[in-house]
Amino acid sequence: MVRVLGWLIFLGLFMPVLASTAAPDPHSFANFQQVRTRHLVLDLAVDFTRQQLTGFAEHQLERLDPSINRLVLDSRHLKITTVTFTNDGVHWQKAAYLLGIEDALKGQPLTIQLQNNTKAVRVYYQTTPQASGLQWLTAAQTSEKKQPFLFSQSQAIHARSWIPLQDTPANRITYQARIKTPADLLAVMSADNSANFNRNGDYQFDMPQPLPSYLIALAVGDLHFKAMSADTGVYAEKLWLDRATAEFSDTQKMMDAANQLFGKYPWKRYDLLVLPSSFPFGGMENPRLSFVTPTIITGDKSLISLVAHELAHSWSGNLVTNASWNDVWLNEGFTNYVENRIMHKVYGQPRADMELLLNVRALRNLLTHQAPADSRLQADYRGRDPDEAFHQIPYVKGQLLLLTLAQHFGQAQFDQFLRDYFAHFAFQSIETESFVRYFQQQLNSKQSFSEQALSRWLTAPGLPDELALPASDAFARVSVAQQQWLAGKAGLRLLPTAQWSVHEWLHFIDLLPRELTEQQLSELDLAFSLSQSSNAEIFTAWAQLVIPLNYQPIIQPLRQFLLSVGRQKFIVPLYSELKANPQWRSWARQVYREARPGYHPLAQQQLDKLTL
């Protein structure tokens, strides 16, 4: 009877917080406005045999509301073994806790009872195979096929699947970590990696600058390091190391350009980690250590803008962060804009313009089938997976808003405004309203850019009519050459393609008619070896063109591509085209069954929805 009464009292203590878990961030259970983590300490062991992380997460707390005696953390598919607390930082004792009812999207709230003077809590736990933020690769699934590999992907709300924490971009924390691994592997994190010179299976990390939870990152593998400059370098498997450092050798130039435009780089070092090809994204902007896909290593630096994008996040997103995923344009639209300014500085206006115009074309294509409500910059993703927010609207429409403001106020004045904006909101998480207030006070005090126009950009669907885009002579020349071939006035080998950039090739392929004959497809392939292209962007654009036309020579290269590349930008549209073609759907289903184990859980989740 006493045990039952104690349990009922325990439940009673937690009922108020369980009934009021509606937080400012609709994708988090955390009560970070009442009690928040200021500093996180991780102590985790990496077990490749069980594919499991085991250890504890220590939360050093700040009590914003002294009357609140509960800490609420986010968790998803974690096995919690025990929770302890300390009132003096020395002595630890068991804490009462409750793992709440599971929500299909957000996971489970982990509610921990606090005393009035509790300084910190430790949550001892294990990850499970359902951790969406981790991918465990066997040795056979890596580039060198010698050692296993582990990497995390915490954005948007996947950190909670491998760490119990307040998983919201609204709360920023510093962190330290101890990661124990097999002795012949190296661990790296989005932190200061300088303490880990020797491979000893016991690694220490420190991140002294506050960041949101989605930027906590971990990778473990047979990694090696090569410096590119005093402040930049590359981590990769040996197979990629020399190629990657040659491909990314302009990183210091990009950093210098960004420093000049937007203020001193705020994170000390900037290194790149080349992940296995199963990485589902082009890159992830984890501070001090951007994760990047090997698909951008082409030998000609043609896809280096992705590095510029991840570097740009050091200011837009990492330094100044959206407070919730409904305002993701504050991260991605600003980053697309900063990326383009960096590309302009380092590679010149023509290349920057071509990249912008290709982005706008992708945006316009998306708008033809996007739900109007989701084509607003200020979108509403309550009750939905915030991963759905990452598409061309926040990236490119946000970029175009900033481009419009730069055209209105002048480039130099707008660059200075952004420099001041990053300094003013440094290491803060903000909402769109904060940006608007700052913009009105610092740049638009005379109201020369109307509130109505700004409101249309932020809250109206689609693109405003006043959009002005640069013209590209390079694209015009490509279009003329294409029309000459289609009209039979010039053979393909006479077209001036020798100096074409990847952007011109993409323009050429994108504008080809969708009803080309078998003879025309063969002629294109014979002249330019498009089915054998080692550039993933060009190959994907070509494959999307020819799959609906049942072009047989693409089958074997396409199969090999789908088995070896896991980047969602490529494989999702390719499988979508295959599904739409009844003649190839069964073949695609067989390929997917074979390829699926090597895809990241996020890619698997998206592709499973296609129901091939």
Image: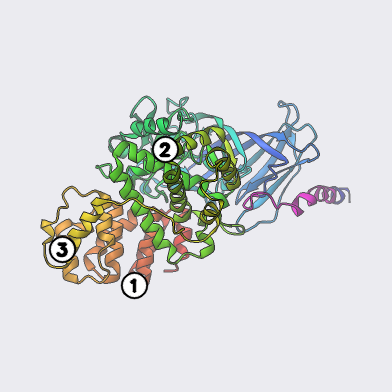
Seen in the picture, residue 611 relative to 292 is either above or below; the reply is below
Tell me the quarter of the image containing the C terminus. bottom left
Task: Please state the extent of the stretch shown in magenta in the rendering.
Answer: 7-28
Secondary element at image label 1: loop
Q: Is residue 393 visible?
A: yes
| Marked residue nearer the N-terminal end (2 or 1) | 2
Decide if residue 110 is on the left or right side of residue 141: right
Residue wearing tag 1: 581
Residue wearing tag 2: 311
| Marked residue nearer the N-terminal end (3 or 2) | 2
| Residue 375 image point, x, y percent | 50, 60
Callout 2, which amino acid? Leu
Decide if residue 433 is on the left or right side of residue 343: right
Callout 1, which amino acid? Asn
Magenta stretch: residue 24 in it? yes
- For this rendering, which residue is in front, 427 or 225? 427
